[in-house]
Image: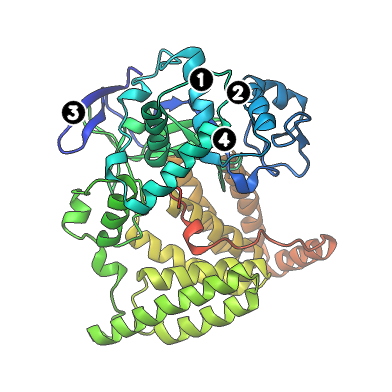
């Protein structure tokens, strides 16, 4: 960890600063989890050792709970699962993910102590748990988890005080980090990464965190000078300043004082009206359209949860037709409508319609996000693929190239997503050359290829909130 130094960050407590200069895309440090578990909801679809998504997994013959790719993964995960396996059998049921993660952390602490590698900068007892900052309702759930943990914790394991157990629960409550699948596209579990816990928040950060081949990587988004504090964003910048500060206060127990919050930077774009021929809508018109969008977003989400995607399209289309003439193309509610429409229409295989909304979404994101923001990169990739599927090869190739440039910085060249994008970039470049030589031949060959290939459904659309997933896990 020669690249970073612990220091007292004014108003934030301990933090990390760079001990040398970094440039965009540099890996500042990588770290394995102290312990990690698969989410309860995905326990039968994700390998509990490598966190890969697989169609067929082998179940542990003892506890009947843990699932693995094969015997290799099962053997690799046995050291962590051994005590958990016996505990689940004795308990008679499977506890929730928070209890399972705390137990794994406690077993590792008992076996190896608080420092498990030469690169670990802090012990777990030095990290903040913020229990005293919890609200009454949250404390009730917290105490239920501790009670259930004590029932689950084996009598033959080392016994700990309630203060020690509470501290670990508090740690994962405000410092847990979501673990993604092998493609980096879905959060599938939660883990604790001690060094990452030292990196403070900024709404416009100079770093991002990516899970790559089982380890998290802290990567630089641009030039970082020696001695500069390293920061990541705990929440999505697409929220307005007031909402970001509310989320940070309720979920992470601090008041954000970053420049973008204090000066409400870009809030006017996120909630503004559309100017046409020098004429702007009134504040009342913008508010009316904003309120309408907010109501329709809730209806849309209810329809999505029911799997009624044609109803989702109907709600979104009516809302867009009514509010698009009034709201700016950077208005966050309109962006969410466009995002949902592009994803649902792609799922229903109306690719031209999906491509139009995806393009609008990316153009709005480009005016709001840092140019090297991973969310922007993923959105550009999605838009590029959708245009490609629609036969709009020129725009599709351009979007894929843009996504590739961003993800080379945020994810790096060895990440599976970046490798996929590289293949897409080469393929679309070849198709684009063919298109420019003879459009008729290109479209004829494309139609023939589509006829010979059976149509497959896209992944089901996720919720609006899941579309831009927070990196830091917070149980809702």
Q: Earlier in the sequence, mark 2 or mark 3?
A: 3
Q: Secondary structure at mark 4?
A: strand
Pointers 4 and 3 in contact (C-beta within 8 Å): no
Tag of residue 108: 1
The answer for how far apart the CA atoms under marks 2 and 3 are is: 34 Å
The answer for how far apart the CA atoms under marks 2 and 1 are is: 8 Å
Q: Count numbered badges in the picture.
A: 4
Pointers 2 and 1 in contact (C-beta within 8 Å): yes
**Residue that mark 3 sits on:** 8
Tell me the crowding category of disc 4: few under 14, some 14 to 19, or many 20 or more residues within 10 angstroms, Cα based: many
**Front residue of this view, candidates 399 and 429:** 399
Residue 245 visible to an observer of this rendering: yes
**Residue that mark 4 sits on:** 37
In the picture, which quadrant includes the N terminus?
A: top left
Image coordinates for residue 82, horizontal then vertical, percent: 65, 22
**Front residue of this view, candidates 73 and 408:** 73
Q: Secondary structure at mark 2?
A: helix
**Residue that mark 2 sits on:** 80
**Front residue of this view, candidates 417 and 229:** 229
Image coordinates for residue 360, horizontal then vertical, percent: 45, 69
Q: State left or right for residue 9 relative to residue 187.
A: left
The answer for how far apart the CA atoms under marks 2 and 4 are is: 10 Å
User: Vertically, is 220 above or below 322?
Assistant: above
Q: Secondary structure at mark 3?
A: strand
Tell me the crowding category of disc 3: few under 14, some 14 to 19, or many 20 or more residues within 10 angstroms, Cα based: few
């Amino acid at each position: 960890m020669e690249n970073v130094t612990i220091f007292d960050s004014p108003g934030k407590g301990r933090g990390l600063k760079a001990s040398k200069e970094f440039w965009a895309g540099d890996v500042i440090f990588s770290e394995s989890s102290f312990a990690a578990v698969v989410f309860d909801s995905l326990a039968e679809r994700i390998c509990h050792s490598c966190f890969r998504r697989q169609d067929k997994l082998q179940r542990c013959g003892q506890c009947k709970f843990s699932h693995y790719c094969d015997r290799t993964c099962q053997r690799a995960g046995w050291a962590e699962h051994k005590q958990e396996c016996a505990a689940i059998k004795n308990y008679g049921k499977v506890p929730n993910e928070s209890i399972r993660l705390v137990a794994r952390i406690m077993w590792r602490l008992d076996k190896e102590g608080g420092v498990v590698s030469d690169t670990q900068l802090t012990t777990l007892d030095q990290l903040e748990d913020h229990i005293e900052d919890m609200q009454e309702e949250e404390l009730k759930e917290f105490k239920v988890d501790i009670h259930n943990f004590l029932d689950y914790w084996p009598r033959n394991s080392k016994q700990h005080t309630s203060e020690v157990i509470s501290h670990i629960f508090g740690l994962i409550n405000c410092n847990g980090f979501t673990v993604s699948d092998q493609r980096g596209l879905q959060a599938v579990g939660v883990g604790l990464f001690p060094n990452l816990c030292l990196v403070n928040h900024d709404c416009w950060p100079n770093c991002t965190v990516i899970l790559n081949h089982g380890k998290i990587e802290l990567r630089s988004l641009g030039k970082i000078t020696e001695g500069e504090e390293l920061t990541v964003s705990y929440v999505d910048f697409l929220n307005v300043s007031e909402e970001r500060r509310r989320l940070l206060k309720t979920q992470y127990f601090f008041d954000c004082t970053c420049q973008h919050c204090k000066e409400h930077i870009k809030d006017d774009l996120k909630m503004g009206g559309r100017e046409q021929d020098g004429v702007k809508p009134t504040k009342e018109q913008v508010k009316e359209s904003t309120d309408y969008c907010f109501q329709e977003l809730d209806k849309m989400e209810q329809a999505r949860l029911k799997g009624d995607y044609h109803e989702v399209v109907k709600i979104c289309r009516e809302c867009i037709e009514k509010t698009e003439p009034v709201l700016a193309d950077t208005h966050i509610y309109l962006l969410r409508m466009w995002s949902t429409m592009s994803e649902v229409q792609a799922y229903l295989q109306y690719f031209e319609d999906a491509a139009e909304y995806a393009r609008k979404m990316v153009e709005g994101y480009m005016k709001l996000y840092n140019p090297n923001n991973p969310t922007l990169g993923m959105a550009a990739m999605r838009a590029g693929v959708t245009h490609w599927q629609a036969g709009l090869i020129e725009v599709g190739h351009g979007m894929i190239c843009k996504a590739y440039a961003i993800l080379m910085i945020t994810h790096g060249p060895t990440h599976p997503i970046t490798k996929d994008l590289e293949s897409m970039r080469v393929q679309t470049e070849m198709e684009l050359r063919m298109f420019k030589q003879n459009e008729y031949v290109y479209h004829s060959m494309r139609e023939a290829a589509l006829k010979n290939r059976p149509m497959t459904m896209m992944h089901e659309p996720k919720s609006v909130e899941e579309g831009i997933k927070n990196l830091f896990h917070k149980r809702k």
